[in-house]
Image: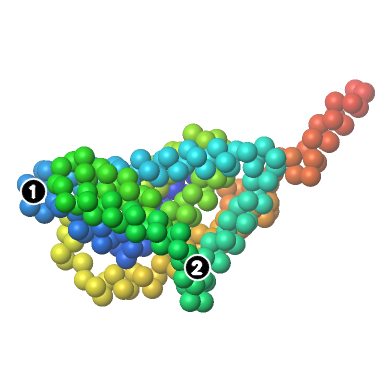
């Protein structure tokens, strides 16, 4: 249960990030000329598209995480991911620029999104949500890192779905009342988001350190084979 609560909490915290990053798409949705009911349905359809994409990420990376778990590398992976996120957080301050492949990928997505914005039916809004979920996003990467350490692929899928649900309050609000969100508010939120991302990265690192702290850094059952050895000793020792 704590695993999924963490996903929802991360989604809620991501709302601050979304206003600055994904906000422009959410605020530009072609829904403002519709009736109140259709406007709500349209915005929820767009968000449902994002959740579908996030859930698919969870399924794929959950299966990848299970393969690492099978080889006893899952907690090491957690540390590597945490460090990777911290590095990614620092790169913009080092004048790091995206590669040509990344640039072409983003441009292609933007082109497809632009064509969908020309339509105003529910199918196009669902498509916008699906593609929006594919855009580079630091908070989604953190959520994917959480999905990688899920107990099963199903848990990982539900984790990402819960993350998506957690983002809805902010994303729905900025779509519905976009005209009232000032540039000053968005800039303030942009200043806060690096600290949130760094905090989540540190949690991943702590989780992988095998400190024996319940829910935060659980001890591996088969840590260095200790538990396995104990079971063998108990089995082999004659009863007195």
Residue 170 appears in the figure: no
Q: Position of residue 8 (x, y in %)?
A: 40, 48
Q: Are marks 1 and 2 in contact (CB under 8 Å)?
A: no
Q: Residue at x 75, y 44 (%)?
A: 223
Quadrant (top left/top right/bottom left/bottom right) for the C terminus:
top right
* Residue topped by disc 2: 89
Which is more toward the observer, 155 or 42? Answer: 42
Helix, strand or loop at disc 1? Answer: loop
Looking at the rendered structure, which numbered label has been put on residue 206? none
* Residue topped by disc 1: 34
Report the number of discs.
2
Q: Residue at x 7, y 52 (%)?
A: 33
Q: In this image, 84 relative to 138: left or right? A: right
Q: Position of residue 186 (x, y in %)?
A: 29, 70
What colour scheme has been applied to the protein in the rendered image?
rainbow
Which is more toward the observer, 95 or 129? Answer: 95
Q: Is residue 84 above or below residue 61?
A: below
Residue 94 appears in the figure: yes
Q: Position of residue 37 (x, y in %)?
A: 11, 43
Q: Position of residue 78 (x, y in %)?
A: 60, 52
Q: In this image, 31 relative to 225: left or right? A: left
Q: Say few, some or many: other residues with alpha carbon within 10 Å of mark 1 (under 14 / 14 to 19 / 20 or more).
A: few
Q: Quadrant of residue 45?
A: top left
Q: Residue at x 45, y 63 (%)?
A: 100
Mark earlier in primary sequence (1, 2): 1
Helix, strand or loop at disc 2? Answer: helix
Q: Residue at x 64, y 42 (%)?
A: 68
Distance of label 1 from label 2 (alpha carbons): 39 Å
Q: Say few, some or many: other residues with alpha carbon within 10 Å of mark 2 (under 14 / 14 to 19 / 20 or more).
A: some
């Amino acid at each position: 249960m704590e695993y999924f609560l963490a996903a929802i909490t991360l989604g809620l915290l991501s709302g601050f990030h979304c206003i600055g990053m994904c906000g422009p798409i959410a605020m530009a949705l072609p829904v403002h000329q519709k009736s109140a009911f259709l406007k709500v349905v349209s915005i929820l359809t767009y968000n449902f598209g994002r959740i579908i994409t996030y859930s698919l990420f969870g399924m794929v990376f959950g299966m990848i995480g299970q393969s690492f778990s099978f080889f006893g590398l899952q907690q090491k992976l957690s540390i590597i991911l945490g460090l990777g996120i911290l590095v990614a957080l620092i790169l913009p301050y080092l004048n790091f620029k995206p590669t040509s492949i990344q640039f072409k990928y983003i441009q292609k997505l933007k082109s497809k999104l632009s064509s969908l914005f020309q339509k105003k039916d529910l199918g196009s809004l669902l498509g916008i949500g699906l593609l929006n979920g594919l855009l580079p996003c630091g908070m989604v990467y953190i959520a994917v890192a959480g999905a990688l350490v899920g107990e099963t692929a199903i848990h990982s899928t539900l984790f990402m779905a819960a993350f998506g649900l957690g983002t809805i309050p902010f994303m729905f609000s900025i779509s519905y009342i976009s005209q009232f969100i000032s540039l000053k508010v968005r800039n303030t939120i942009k200043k806060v988001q690096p600290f949130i991302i760094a905090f989540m990265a540190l949690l991943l690192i702590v989780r992988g350190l095998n400190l024996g702290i319940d829910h935060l850094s659980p001890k591996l059952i088969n840590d260095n084979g200790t538990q396995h050895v104990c079971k063998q000793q108990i089995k082999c020792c004659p009863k007195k």
